[in-house]
Amino acid sequence: MEESWECSAERVAMLVDDVVRRPDPAVVAAAGDERAITLPREHLLGAVHERFVGIPGGGRHADGSDGDVSRRVAEAVAESAAYDEAELLGRFAQVAAKAPLMASTRPCAPCNRHKSKPCW
């Protein structure tokens, strides 16, 4: 039985890895019992492993936890989006601090690129 779990976990991990590489998702969420989540996670590599979020519950049988699982997935997506936004703003702040500011609001003389129109 243990070998069957491991084999299934490896196949699930390969499938998840293949699917994730296509659209490059921010979050990979899996719901189920603890073993169904942790075993495939052990076989995931790199960015897929980093994006993987295990959500307990939501097994095969309808037990009324679908709403709870949906809420937890939404929370994981929101947390990932907030992290990405903070990272992007941090990078922007670094670049903005190094970039020279445009001090003049007057247009320059017409240039070759803009032909007769002055560029700003």
Image: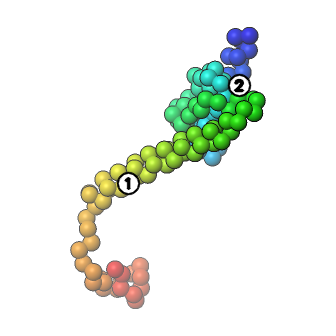
The answer to which image quadrant residue 51 occupies is: top right
Q: In the image, what residue occupies the spot 30% across and 53% down?
A: 94
| The C terminus lies in quadrant | bottom left
Answer left or right for 88 relative to 49: left
The image shows residue 97, relative to residue 59, as above or below, that is below
Going by the numbered disc 1, the residue's amino acid type is: Leu
| The N terminus lies in quadrant | top right
For marks 1 and 2 on the same chain, the one whose residue lies earlier in the sequence: 2
Q: Secondary structure at mark 2?
A: helix
The dot on residue 11 is 2
Say few, some or many: other residues with alpha carbon within 10 Å of mark 1 (under 14 / 14 to 19 / 20 or more). Answer: few
Q: Nearest the camera: 114 or 99?
A: 99
View extreme (left): residue:
103
The dot on residue 89 is 1
Where residue 14 sits: x, y (%)?
Answer: 67, 29
The image shows residue 102, relative to residue 96, as above or below, that is below
Q: Are marks 1 and 2 in contact (CB under 8 Å)?
A: no
Answer left or right for 98 relative to 25: left
Answer left or right for 28 relative to 1: left
Q: Nearest the camera: 64 or 59?
A: 64
Q: Secondary structure at mark 1?
A: helix
Going by the numbered disc 2, the residue's amino acid type is: Arg
Q: Nearest the camera: 81 or 34?
A: 34
Q: Is residue 17 visible?
A: no
Where residue 39 sits: x, y (%)?
Answer: 62, 21
Where residue 9 sits: x, y (%)?
Answer: 67, 22
Answer left or right for 98 relative to 3: left
Where residue 119 sits: x, y (%)?
Answer: 36, 81
Q: Alpha-carbon distance for marks 1 and 2?
A: 38 Å
Q: In the image, what residue occupies the spot 39% across and 87% down?
A: 117
Q: In the image, what residue occupies the spot 44% across and 45% down?
A: 83
